[in-house]
Structures are given as structure tokens and as C-alpha cells.
């Protein structure tokens, strides 16, 4: 009888230990790896935001130098963000020229490609580019995605 109880206790102990080890490898360890992946993804996005901040500041300095050398027109205060969905750095600004000329633009700073523009002369849309409502819609689409 003692042997049977001892054997049953050992079998139960082995079963509990086996269940615990299986639970660790099947549930806890994968969850821990997912947490680590999430943290490294957040660090990556933060690094890309910081890089975009730096690129935006550099672009604005270039525009200020251009404005000083040309001695005409003014650039507005820029807005630059890292767009996680598009995995790119976007830069939006406005240029006010002489004689009522104004140009809004959004540039991808990674490719230096202009994604949207709206030019106007005396408050009326002018030449190529989007109308002001179209530009504002595109701006909302691009600049508000993180």
C-alpha cells in the first residue's frame, strides 16, 4: 500500500512538472519574445522619429539659407513627422513670394520627392498642383498617420 501511494505521488509529481515545463515553453516564453519584439519595434520607431526630426531641421536650415541669399519671399514654420504607415519622413511648409504668390508643399525627405503642392497667386489656385481643398485633404492623409 505504501509503495502504491509512493508510486502514485511520484507519477503525479512528474505529471505536474511536465505540465509546468510545457506551459513555460508553449505560453510564457513566446509571450516574452513578443514583448521583446514589441519593445524593439518601439525603439526602432522612436529612432526613426528622431532621425526625421533631424532631417526636418536640416531642410528648414537649407530653406532659410536659400531665403537669405535670394532676399525675396519668406518660408513659414515647417511641420515634419515620421509616417510609420508609409515608413518615411514627411516635411510640410509654405513659401510666401512677392506679388501675392504662395506655395504649400509636402516633401518626402528620404527620397526628396514632392508628394503634394498647392500654388496660388492672389488667393487663386495657380498652374500645376492640387486645389487648396485637395491639398488640405492630402495633408491630412499624409501628415496625420503615425
Image (cartoon, grey):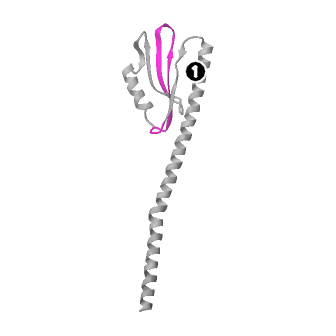
In the image, is residue 85 above or below residue 74?
below
Percent of width and height locating residue 137: 38, 26
Q: Position of residue 7 (x, y in %)?
A: 44, 86
> Residue, x 50% and y 57% (percent of image)?
33
- In the rendered image, is residue 131 in sight? no
At 57% from the left and 36% from the top, the residue drawn is 51
> Is 124 within the magenta?
no
Q: Residue at x 60, y 18 (%)?
A: 66
Position of the N terminus by quadrant: bottom left
Q: Main secondary structure of the magenta part?
A: strand
In front of the other: 74 or 114: 74
Q: Report helix, strand or loop for mark 1.
A: helix
Q: Nearer the viewer, residue 69 or 14?
A: 14
User: Can you identify the residue that label 1 sits on?
Assistant: 63
Which range is magenta?
83-106
The C terminus - image quarter: top left
In the depicted structure, whether residue 24 falls above or below residue 75: below
Q: Dividing the picture into quarters, in which one does residue 46 lie? A: top right
* Residue 98 included in the magenta stretch of the image: yes
The residue nearer to you, when weighing 72 against 46, is 46
Amino acid at each position: 500500500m505504501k509503495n502504491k501511494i509512493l508510486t502514485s505521488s511520484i507519477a503525479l509529481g512528474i505529471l505536474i512538472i511536465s505540465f509546468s515545463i510545457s506551459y513555460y515553453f508553449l505560453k510564457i516564453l513566446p509571450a516574452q519574445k513578443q514583448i521583446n519584439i514589441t519593445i524593439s519595434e518601439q525603439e526602432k520607431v522612436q529612432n526613426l522619429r528622431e532621425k526625421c526630426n533631424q532631417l526636418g531641421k536640416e531642410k528648414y536650415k537649407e530653406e532659410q539659407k536659400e531665403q537669405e541669399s535670394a532676399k525675396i519671399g519668406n518660408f513659414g514654420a515647417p511641420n515634419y513627422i515620421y509616417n510609420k504607415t508609409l515608413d518615411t519622413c514627411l516635411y510640410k511648409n509654405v513659401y510666401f513670394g512677392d506679388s501675392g504668390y504662395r506655395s504649400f508643399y509636402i516633401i518626402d525627405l528620404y527620397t526628396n520627392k514632392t508628394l503634394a503642392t498647392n500654388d496660388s497667386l492672389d488667393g487663386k489656385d495657380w498652374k500645376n498642383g492640387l486645389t487648396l481643398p485637395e491639398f488640405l485633404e492630402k495633408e491630412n492623409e499624409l501628415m496625420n498617420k503615425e
